[in-house]
Amino acid sequence: MTFTLAHLSDAHIGPLPKPSLAELMSKRGLGYINWRRGRDRAHDMDLLSRLVGDILRHRPDHIAMTGDILNIGLPAEYPAAAAWLRTLGDPVDVSFTPGNHDAYVRDSMPHLAAAFAPWTTSDGDVGAGPTFPYLRLRTDVALIGLSSGAPSGPLMATGRLGDEQLNRLEQILGETGARGFARVIMIHHPALYAGASALRRLTDARALEAIVARAGAELIVHGHNHVRSVAYLASPASRTLGGRIPVVGAPSASSASLTPRLRAGYHLMRLERQGAAWRVSARARGPLADSKEIGEQREIDL
């Protein structure tokens, strides 16, 4: 059995709707200044569209979008974000996990919950509203979505899961592992304490690491840092070949940077059952050097 997962993150779609003065009387004010000073030019919507087209041509079994579709959490950003997410496919075939820009300030949260509900619910819970973690079973793969998107202070981009999510995650990992599923955790922030700086990291990353080490998983995908990255968590309960869990970060899917490590891209992840174990591999795709063509940038050694 082979399962292909397309993973992209940090679309930061634009243009940004014009905010009211009242909407800027918060952390959004600094974010708006940052956007006007150049962040808008850091993200290329035409490139993002070509990248999405390439994903769809590969017809993956599922698509994981791990957050930061928005920029400063304006109410007017959410309908556009949901419309863009629909371009990836039916919510049954697409999963979303919120990032810090999607949960920019406290009054963003009701808009986030309403806009993204179809992509953030467990099987059979459509219409019930988002709950995290959610669980989607696809053939022999368990897709587990976490929300690390939580409002944070000015100049901060931290995330948080909280005890309720963490406890439920351990239960889900145990149950799906006992049933033989390949367990894929989807989250915006890196699932490692060392995965980001103090003002940008998941604040309860150590607790997440401990749970995954105890319960096991076969793959963790995330975004947030806008760079491609590969790290590992050790777990005797993991059934990957080699007994370690790949933690794979995707770059920004709309990055206009020409610097190779910051270039836009996405990953095609392949989970292949081999007896009682799972082989995990990945290919990085994105714009080729000096070209608008989307192609294979490299194979990722996992």
Image (spheres, helix red, strand yellow):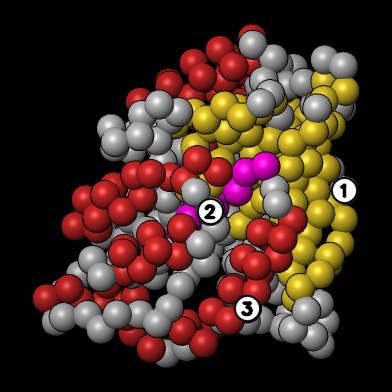
Residue 164: where, in percent of width, then height? 35, 26
Residue 148: where, in percent of width, then height? 43, 45
> Mark 2 packing: few (<14 Cα in 10 Å), some, or many (20+)?
some
Q: Amino acid at mark 3?
A: Leu
> Mark 3 packing: few (<14 Cα in 10 Å), some, or many (20+)?
many
**Relative to 18, residue 120 above or below:** above
Which residue range is magenta in the image? Answer: 61-68
Q: Is residue 75 among the parts visible in the rendering?
A: yes
Q: Which residue is mark 1?
A: 301
| Residue 144 on the magenta span | no
**Relative to 185, residue 88 above or below:** below
Q: Amino acid at mark 2?
A: Gly
Q: Amino acid at mark 1?
A: Asp
Residue located 74% across and 36% down the image: 3
Of the two numbered discs 2 and 1 on the same chain, state the one appearing first in sequence.
2
Q: Which residue is mark 3?
A: 47
Q: Nearer the viewer, mark 1 or mark 3?
A: 3
Please state if 26 lies on the left or on the right of 4 as rendered. left
Please state if 87 lies on the left or on the right of 258 as rendered. left
Front residue of this view, candidates 291 and 9:
291
Q: Is residue 202 among the parts visible in the rendering?
A: no
**In whole angstroms, how far apart are the C-alphas of marks 1 and 3?**
26 Å
Of the two numbered discs 3 and 2 on the same chain, state the one appearing first in sequence.
3
Q: Residue reaching furthest top?
A: 178
